[in-house]
Image (tube, rainbow, N blue to C red):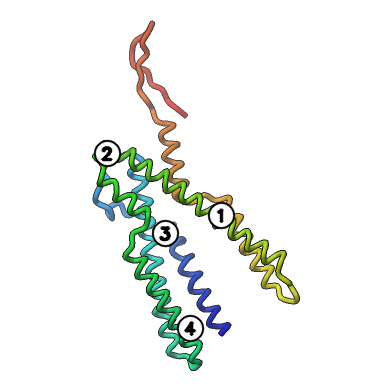
Amino acid sequence: MKRITCIIILLLFLTLLIPRVEANQLSINNDSFTMLTTEQDGIAQVTLKRVADRERTQRRLSAGLLIGAGAGSYIYAATLDDSGDKRTLRVTGGVFASLGLLQLVVPSTEEREYRSLADYQPEQRELAAKESMAYLADRAERERVLSGISNAGLAIYYLFTQPYEDNSANIYSGLIFGGTAFYQFNSKSYVEEAYERIERAERSRVNAAWIVGEYTGPMLMVNF
C-alpha cells in the first residue's frame, strides 16, 4: 500500500509541475487565436492574447498528463495481485482521467477573458483588455500568496510540531515546503509580470500636448 501511495503522489506531482515548466519554454503561437489580434491592437490586447495562449497550452498539457496518468494507473492495476491495491489504483486512475477530460474541454479564466473582448467595439477593446489583465493579475497574486501561506504553514508543522525520532523525512518535508513558500512569496507569476509590463509601457508612452499662452504649438511629453 505504501508503494501505491507513493506512485499516486508522484503522478499527481508530475501533472502539476511538468505543464508549468513546458508552458514557460514554449513560444506563443500568434495564429492560434484568430479573432482579434492585428497590427493595430494595443499592448493590453496583445498581452492578454499571449496570456490566454500560454494558459491554453498549459491546460492541454496538464489534461494530457492527467489522462495519461489515469490510463497508466488503470493498466498497472491489472498487473497487481492484491485486490485492495488494484481497486485503489483503478479508482485513482478514473479520477485522474475524469479530471483530465474536464480540464481538456473547459477553457481557463484567461481564455474566457480574452474571448470576451469580442463583445466590445474595436475602440473599446484595449481598455477592456487592460481591465481583464488587472483582474487576472490581482487573482494570480491572491492565489500565489495563499499558496505561499499554506506551504509556510506546512513547513512549520513538519519542522516544529512533528516528532523527529530517527526519521529525517519530516525535516526534508519541512524544508521543501519552506523553500516553496519562500519562492512563492518572492517570485511574481507570469500574469502579474505581464500586467506590470503594460503599466510600464503606458507610463513611458510619448504623449502629444499643446501649450496655450506665450507659446502655442506642439510639445512632446515623455512620462517615465
**Measuring 72% from the left and 64% from the top, which residue is drawn there?**
160
Position above or below: 8 against 156: below
Residue behind mark 1: 184
Element assignment for label 4 = helix
Residue behind mark 3: 23
Residue behind mark 2: 40
Left or right: residue 36 compared with residue 55: left
Q: Earlier in the sequence, mark 4 or mark 3?
A: 3
**Measuring 52% from the left and 74% from the top, which residue is drawn there?**
10
Q: Earlier in the sequence, mark 3 or mark 2?
A: 3
Q: Are marks 2 and 1 in contact (CB under 8 Å)?
A: no
Which three-letter amino acid code belongs to the residue tagged 4? Thr
Q: CA distance from mark 3 to mark 2?
A: 27 Å
In which quadrant will I find the N terminus?
bottom right
Q: CA distance from mark 4 to mark 3?
A: 31 Å
Residue behind mark 4: 88
Crowd tier of the residue under label 4, counting other residues whose Cα lies within 10 Å: few below 14, some 14–19, many 20 or above: some
Element assignment for label 3 = helix
Crowd tier of the residue under label 3, counting other residues whose Cα lies within 10 Å: few below 14, some 14–19, many 20 or above: some
Q: Quadrant of residue 132?
A: top left
Which three-letter amino acid code belongs to the residue tagged 2? Gln
Tag of residue 216? none
Crowd tier of the residue under label 2, counting other residues whose Cα lies within 10 Å: few below 14, some 14–19, many 20 or above: few
Q: Residue furthest right?
A: 165
Q: Nearer the viewer, residue 9 or 154?
A: 154
Q: Earlier in the sequence, mark 2 or mark 1?
A: 2
Q: Earlier in the sequence, mark 3 or mark 1?
A: 3
